[in-house]
Amino acid sequence: MNILGIETSCDETAAAVVKDGIIIISSVIASSAEMHIRSGGIIPEKAAREQTKSILPVIDHSLVQAKTDPEKIDAIAVTIGPGLIGSLLVGVEVARTLSYLWKKPVIPVNHLLAHIYANWLTGRPDPEFPALALVVSGGHTDLVLITDHSKLTWIGGTRDDAAGEAFDKTARLLGLPYPGGPSIGKEAAKYLDTHPQAPLNLFPRPMLKNDNFDWSFSGLKTAVYREVNNKKFDPSHMAAEVQEAIVDVLVVKTLKAINLYEPKSLLLAGGVAANLRLRETFENQIRRSKIKVDFRLPPIGLCTDNAAIVASAAFFNNRPVSAELLEVNPALSITGQF
Ligand code: KG4
Ligand code: ZN
């Protein structure tokens, strides 16, 4: 089954053709990130305007790259939320129109669930259930237990800022460019290369010892602000400290959840899962603690927003709706669709 995925929840415009939920035939991503670098963050109206311009060429390109045409597409999958309302509408209205034109079913997809399906696109055997998934993106931080496709239980998440948001906001305070996650990662690597053994405990680790699987990242901004405002500071050192504070709490709480729920697989997902320090720390801690879990990390290019994950999630959670009932839901939660 060939599914055309469409993704426009944030500043990317993406389309992909995926076969049977696991084989990427084509994947095209146009991003307005360059434009947002200049403004230091996303301006939603500008992002949506760019998406109206690029959506049709991107879809066309994805079909050409797949050497296919609409007749050979079995269904259209589209992100309905969460995300920016103007951006989501671009994808949803195009999916609705193509569904009428091509007479193909349309499958609404939860963007956060889609992130998890990056782990089905790696060429390895499908992850086994029950699985614990940590979804760390620009707007969300959620820990969910998955007993089967479409069967998710939320077990924890952030109380305030998302992990990606913490990277983005602290990067701004450090004078590093948007998006903050990759900038902090690069800057931190310089410090870690030259100070591999240096302790990194300048910033607080809130809620680390609490008896739950929740996080809080908003205090980190204040702590960084106090540390750098009107003072001389080493951006590489500060970036390494920020990164460690975020990575540390994510890893410790997730491993605690593994000990309690004993899942067969641990799936990392979302833009922050592209962070090298997070990836290494998970690998090292799992090895060191001798926890028995099949740890899955999607390739970096599948962690951040793309449409292949949308098509994959649609294949495994296949719930088509009639095109006139397709609706955006900017505030959809990770368990909201089922
Ligand atoms: O999943 P994603 O592409 O979009 C959303 O659904 O939000 O995630 C974007 C977030 C941004 O906050 C960005 O700074 C962060 O992921 N990010 C990273 C890295 N690459 C992207 N954070 C840390 N390290 C990275 N290498
Ligand atoms: Zn995303």
Image: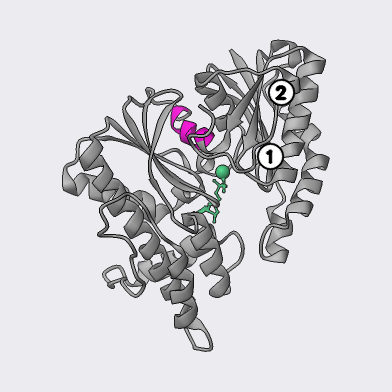
Instruction: Name above or below for residue 118 compared with residue 190.
Output: above
Q: Secondary structure at mark 1?
A: loop
Q: Main secondary structure of the magenta part?
A: helix
Q: Which residues are magenta?
A: 113-120
Instruction: Name above or below for residue 280 compared with residue 109.
Output: below
**Does ligand 2 reach within 8 Å of label 2's beta carbon?**
no
User: Does the magenta-highlighted stretch encompass residue 90?
Assistant: no
Label 1: few (<14), some or many (≥20) within 10 Å? many
Determine the residue positioned at 17% across, 47% down: 289
Residue 176 placed where, x, y %?
A: 57, 69
Mark 1 residue type = Thr
Looking at the image, residue 328 sits to the left or right of residue 111; the answer is right
Determine the residue positioned at 60% across, 38% down: 306
Q: Is residue 60 visible?
A: no
Residue 175 placed where, x, y %?
A: 58, 74
Looking at the image, residue 230 sits to the left or right of residue 203; the answer is right
Mark 2 residue type = Leu
- Of the numbered discs 1 and 2, the one sitting upstream in the chain is 1
Looking at the image, residue 203 sits to the left or right of residue 41; the answer is left
Q: Which residue is mark 1?
A: 8
Q: Which residue is mark 2?
A: 325
**Does ligand 2 reach within 8 Å of label 1's beta carbon?**
no
Label 2: few (<14), some or many (≥20) within 10 Å? few
Residue 180: assigned label: none
Residue 87 placed where, x, y %?
A: 72, 43
**Quarter of the view holding residue 151:** top left
Instruction: Name above or below for residue 223 compared with residue 159.
Output: below
Distance of mark 1 from mark 2, alpha carbons? 19 Å
